[in-house]
């Protein structure tokens, strides 16, 4: 009788345990379910907003140790990187001291702006020779100052790698005679308008940009970061030249810009884009392939000079969170880039405050999105060393430092998800003043 009672008690305990486990599992699945809402402006003169809805299942909070800036997994260092858009330093001596500070705070790499468009802040370490151009010697653009070799020297003395951050289609200074520009369609007015951006379909543009990148590769840099201007918007490029190329690729006799969109009227009677036609998606995929081929040629030009240079590409966060929107809005696809370009690094613009504003979500929800984006990235390209996620450090509107705890939490979210790199964008002296870099460097020790 005693043995039978013990057996019944054991069965009861097992049943109770299983029931408790199922209840906990049900509760967790309810807690971690939510809807992904993406709101992005499709901008024409009417400034109409279109909304797309995506469903995602975010990853539950994982219990892996925080890498903390000094840990390495499978040979992938997770020490922090910086993107530098401006410098307060005015002398070579001050610049040398600056890189010494970065080394003390565990900075591994910097992405350094090497172009100067109108409106950009000047680097004044060396005398400025031109109001627009580049910070290295080339036959394809005016020289602002030959600052890049000095930056590389001081960085390498402190074991810091230098990625030259360079633009392409928006390089207004590019010396490219008679080259074509893109045209965009303005729905509210039913007309085309010439932009100030170079057309990636024009062989003369490819030749000039390739030459510029080849000259850049002759400097002692460790890598090149392609700026996010290597995109084509939802209403660009509709120049006659580009349209003829597209029609030839599709076997079309003709098409009008209006054929790409489902157009409707606003309350005040203005025409706006309500949706996209099948022809639009064919056009977007064609543009995506054309851009990828352009990037592949740039990569070849760089590697031909110095094969060891890393070729990195800026990626909009929608490419991971909402790929269909990224294809529509930017003519971008990670899968297509991987197939044609296979860059050494994808640098994701996972700007947490910008995402909060664009998605209309609180910080905690956006951190969940970023965690999911890291997981998605490694499903697309399962190499942590090829992924970098940027963390926004200043408010784009006010130029003031974002609350340091938000920056720290975003870095922690990225690095507790996978051993990818985190890059603070942009560098600002305030990061030193509030002690944020020092605190990040100590996390996980």
Image (cartoon, rainbow, N blue to C red):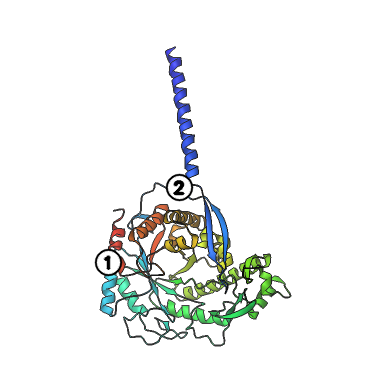
**CA separation in Å, label 2 and label 1:** 35 Å
Residue 433 - label:
1
Q: Quadrant of the N terminus?
A: top left
Look at the picture and state if 61 lies above or below 217.
above
Cβ–Cβ under 8 Å for marks 2 and 1: no
Asked if one can make out residue 19 in the rendered structure from this viewpoint, the answer is yes
What element does badge 1 sit on?
Answer: helix
Look at the picture and state if 237 lies above or below 351.
below
Badge 1 crowding class, 10 Å Cα cut-off, few under 14, some 14 to 19, many 20 or more, is few
User: Is residue 274 left or right of 65 when viewed as pictured?
Assistant: right
What element does badge 2 sit on?
Answer: loop
Residue in the foreground of this view, choosing between 100 and 310: 100
Residue 243 placement (x, y as % from top left): 66, 76
Residue 305 placement (x, y as % from top left): 46, 76
Give the residue number, with chain letter if any, for mark 2: 60
| Count of all numbered marks drawn on residues in the image | 2
Q: Nearer the viewer, mark 2 or mark 1?
A: 1
Q: Quarter of the image holding residue 186?
A: bottom right
Residue at position x 57%, y 74% from top? 45
User: Is residue 316 left or right of 122 when viewed as pictured?
Assistant: right
Residue 236 - label:
none
Residue in the foreground of this view, choosing between 34 and 112: 34
User: Is residue 40 left or right of 92 when viewed as pictured?
Assistant: right
In the displayed image of the protein, which residue is found farthest to the top? 1
Asked if one can make out residue 75 in the rendered structure from this viewpoint, the answer is no
Badge 2 crowding class, 10 Å Cα cut-off, few under 14, some 14 to 19, many 20 or more, is some
First-in-chain label (2 vs 1): 2
Residue 190 placement (x, y as % from top left): 65, 76
Residue at position x 66%, y 69% from top? 260
Residue 343 placement (x, y as % from top left): 49, 66
């Amino acid at each position: 009788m005693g043995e039978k009672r013990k057996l019944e008690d054991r069965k009861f305990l097992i049943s109770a345990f299983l029931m408790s486990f199922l209840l906990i599992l049900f509760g967790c699945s309810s807690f971690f379910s939510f809807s992904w809402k993406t709101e992005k402006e499709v901008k024409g003169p009417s400034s109409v907003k279109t909304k797309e809805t995506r469903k995602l299942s975010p990853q539950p909070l994982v219990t892996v140790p925080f890498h903390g800036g000094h840990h390495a997994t499978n040979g992938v260092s997770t020490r922090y990187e910086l993107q530098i858009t401006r410098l307060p330093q005015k002398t070579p001596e001050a610049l040398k001291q600056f890189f010494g500070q970065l080394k003390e705070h565990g900075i591994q790499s910097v992405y350094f702006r090497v172009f100067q468009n109108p409106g950009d802040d000047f680097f004044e370490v060396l005398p400025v020779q031109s109001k627009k151009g580049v910070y290295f010697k080339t036959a394809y653009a005016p020289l602002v100052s030959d600052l890049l070799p000095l930056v590389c020297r001081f960085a390498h003395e402190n074991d810091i790698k230098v990625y030259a951050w360079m633009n392409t289609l928006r390089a207004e200074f590019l010396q490219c005679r008679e080259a074509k520009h893109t045209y965009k369609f303005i729905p509210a007015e039913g007309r085309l308008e010439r932009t100030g951006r170079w057309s990636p379909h024009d062989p003369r543009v490819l030749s000039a940009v390739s030459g510029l990148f080849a000259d850049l590769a002759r400097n002692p840099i460790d890598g090149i970061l392609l700026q996010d201007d290597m995109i084509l918007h939802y209403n660009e490029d509709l120049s006659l030249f580009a349209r003829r190329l597209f029609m030839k690729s599709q076997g079309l006799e003709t098409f009008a810009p209006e054929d790409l969109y489902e157009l409707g009227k606003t309350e005040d009677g203005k025409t706006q884009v309500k949706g996209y036609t099948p022809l639009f998606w064919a056009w977007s995929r064609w543009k995506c392939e054309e851009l990828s081929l352009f990037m592949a040629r740039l990569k070849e030009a760089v590697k031909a000079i110095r094969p060891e240079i890393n070729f990195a590409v800026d990626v909009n966060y929608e490419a991971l969170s909402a790929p269909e929107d990224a294809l529509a809005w930017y003519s971008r696809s990670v899968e297509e880039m991987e197939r044609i370009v296979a860059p050494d690094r994808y640098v994701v613009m996972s700007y947490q405050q910008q995402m909060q504003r664009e998605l209309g979500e609180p910080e905690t929800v956006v951190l969940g999105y970023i965690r999911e984006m890291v997981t998605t990235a490694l499903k697309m390209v399962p190499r942590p060393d090829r992924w970098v996620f940027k963390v926004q450090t200043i408010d784009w509107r006010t130029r003031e430092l974002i609350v340091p705890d938000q920056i720290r939490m975003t870095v922690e979210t990225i690095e507790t998800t996978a051993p990818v790199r985190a890059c603070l964008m942009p560098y600002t002296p305030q990061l030193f003043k509030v002690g944020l870099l020092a605190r990040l460097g100590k996390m996980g020790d």
